[in-house]
């Protein structure tokens, strides 16, 4: 059935317009009334959709209103402090040191250098050196200290998930007491540590030392960077290490080769020595780490 036109420009017989041409003002009034008619016709054709859309908007407003409702006005600082304390008590945040430890832990390695061929599991210091290491390439490339594996006939590494493997020395940087190891067997999901330049490292920055002090671990200790570009002479006096990071996070024999880590979980150094004027070989508050730039170059990696 043919619909009647919403409006027509044709003149109806007998209309006043037959007598005289329409004035410009009359034409201007006709257009809006025509648009209104078209809008009403469109609304009629889409009435169901309009009702459905309106209902959806009402439901959305009902759901969002409680969330968007403003909180109590004019809170005092005491009220804000109390609410924050209540929130922290209900859901305590992990410490920065704990987050740094969790970030580097998957890349931590226990390193054992044996000076004989026996594999009796003994911790006899006469033929066994225990230290730490860190994975820098997920194919099983590990950084550690040279003195941990020097002279070893067999090197064994244990990854964070408990996987044990033999390893071989593939690179040495004696002037920085560094050795690069390659494990023969690695975990399927091995993760390499994130390394960060020491360019913006400053005294007072918080760091953690992670490793196996006295073979116990993994262990973590927290402290700060105490100084930069330090020198260290070995107790025997036959070796001088330079450009070291000085730190006061507790480190002991067994931490050697382990990572020095910033609070964002990035490795900035390899723990290499502790300063101790006594013969007890225990930590008195001064440890040293080789900057990661030197350590990375030992593995043939490009500088930062």
Image (spheres, rainbow, N blue to C red):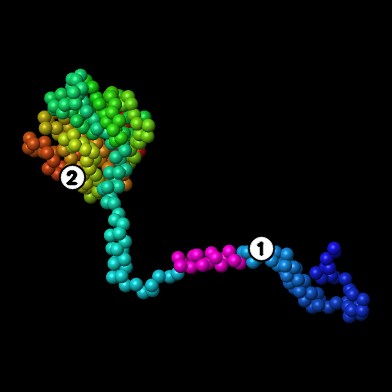
- Residue at 32 percent across and 43 percent down: it is 103
| Camera-nearest residue between 24 and 184 | 184
Q: Which residue is mark 1?
A: 49
| Camera-nearest residue between 209 and 225 | 209
Magenta residues, as a range? 54-68
Estimate the x, y position of residue 280 in percent, counting from the top left.
8, 36
Estimate the x, y position of residue 47 in percent, counting from the top left.
69, 66
Q: Is residue 56 left or right of residue 155?
A: right
Where, quadrant-wise, is the N terminus in this rendering? bottom right
Q: Which residue is mark 2?
A: 248
Q: Looking at the rendering, which quadrant does residue 35 occupy?
A: bottom right
Image vertical order of residue 60 relative to residue 286, above or below: below
| Camera-nearest residue between 24 and 52 | 52
Please identify the dominant SS of the magenta region. Answer: helix
In terms of secondary structure, where does tag 2 sit? loop
Q: Earlier in the sequence, mark 1 or mark 2?
A: 1
Estimate the x, y position of residue 121 in percent, counting from the top left.
19, 26
């Amino acid at each position: 059935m043919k619909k009647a036109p919403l409006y027509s420009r044709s003149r109806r017989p007998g209309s006043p317009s037959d007598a005289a041409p329409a004035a410009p003002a009359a034409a201007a009034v006709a257009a809006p009334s025509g648009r209104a008619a078209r809008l009403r016709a469109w609304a009629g054709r889409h009435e169901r959709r309009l009702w459905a859309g309106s209902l959806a908007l009402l439901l959305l407003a009902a759901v969002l209103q409680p969330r968007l409702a403003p909180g109590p006005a004019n809170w005092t600082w005491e009220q804000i402090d109390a609410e924050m304390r209540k929130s922290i008590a209900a859901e305590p945040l992990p410490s920065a040191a704990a987050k740094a430890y969790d970030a580097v832990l998957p890349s931590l390695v226990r390193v054992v250098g044996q000076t004989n061929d026996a594999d009796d599991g003994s911790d006899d210091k006469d033929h066994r050196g225990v230290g730490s290491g860190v994975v820098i390439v997920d194919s099983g490339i590990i950084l550690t200290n040279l003195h941990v594996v020097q002279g070893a006939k067999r090197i064994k590494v244990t990854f964070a998930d408990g996987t044990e493997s033999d390893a071989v020395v593939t690179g040495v940087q004696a002037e920085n007491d560094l050795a690069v190891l390659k494990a023969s067997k690695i975990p399927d999901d091995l993760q390499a540590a994130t390394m960060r330049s020491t360019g913006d490292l400053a005294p007072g920055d918080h760091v953690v030392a992670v490793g196996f002090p006295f073979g116990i671990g993994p262990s973590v200790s927290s402290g700060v960077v105490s100084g930069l570009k330090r020198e260290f002479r070995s107790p025997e006096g036959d070796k001088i290490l330079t450009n070291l990071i000085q730190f006061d996070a507790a480190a002991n024999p067994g931490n050697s080769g382990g990572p020095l880590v910033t609070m964002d979980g990035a490795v900035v150094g390899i723990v290499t020595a502790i300063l101790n004027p006594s013969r007890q070989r225990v930590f008195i508050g001064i440890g040293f780490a080789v900057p990661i730039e030197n350590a990375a170059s030992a593995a043939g990696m490009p500088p930062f």
